[in-house]
Structures are given as structure tokens and as C-alpha cells.
Image (cartoon, helix red, strand yellow):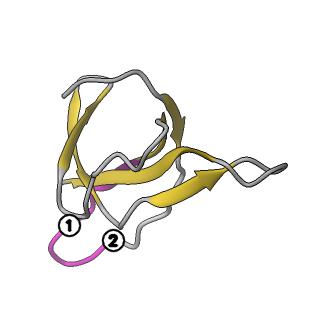
Amino acid sequence: MSTSALVAPVSRTDQDTPVSTGVTVAYDIYARSRTPTGVREGDVAVVRGQRLLVVSEPAVWHRKRGGGHVGDVISVGWKKG
């Protein structure tokens, strides 16, 4: 399935380990939909040409006034290196 969504980069600082000195690439995806998207933790999403893992269960995005469902907020990321 393919859909348009708002994508916001997330900055993270990682500690170097004896195994990795990589960089974490992470985004929050704001996917508009009238019903939950069905995305689950562990799914893979392609964001800006990169295959990224969904790192947590999506949060529900509600309207501030009236409380209606706007969509889901999906956190994705991958550690390179």
C-alpha cells in the first residue's frame, strides 16, 4: 500500500558501542486516515527512499477540538553502522 503523509525527522543521539559507531535515522510519519491505518510495530515503511522499521505501535492522532480521529503517528527508524 502507498499513501501520502507528513514526515518529520527525529534527532537522536547515540552512544558509541564497541560494536557500532553508527547513526540512527528516524522519522515520525503523520498519516491521515478516517480509520486506523493497521500499521504495527515491526512493519517496514519506505520513507524518502529508505526502508525503515516501525519501532513502536502507532499513536492515534486526534483533533484538538471535537476529538475526532485524524490519523496515526508512526515512528520509524534504523541504525546505520
Percent x, y for residue 71?
Answer: 52, 43
Residue nearest the viewer, comparing 31 with 75? 31
Q: Is residue 18 magenta?
A: yes
Label 1 amino acid? Ser
- Residue at x 40%, y 50% (from the top left corner): 36
Q: Secondary structure at mark 1?
A: loop
The mark tally for this picture is 2
Is residue 72 rendered to the left or right of residue 44? right
Start and end of the magenta stretch? 16-26
Q: Which mark is residue 52?
A: none
Is residue 23 rendered to the left or right of residue 2? right
Q: Residue furthest right?
A: 65
Is residue 49 rendered to the left or right of residue 36? left
**Circle 2 residues within 10 Å: few <14, some 14–19, many ≥20:** few
Name the residue beneath numbered marker 1. 20
Question: CB under 8 Å between callouts 2 and 1?
Answer: yes
From where the camera sits, is residue 24 visible? Answer: no
Name the residue beneath numbered marker 2. 16
Among the 4 quarters of the image, the one containing residue 14:
bottom left
Q: On the rendered image, what quadrant is the C terminus found in?
A: bottom left
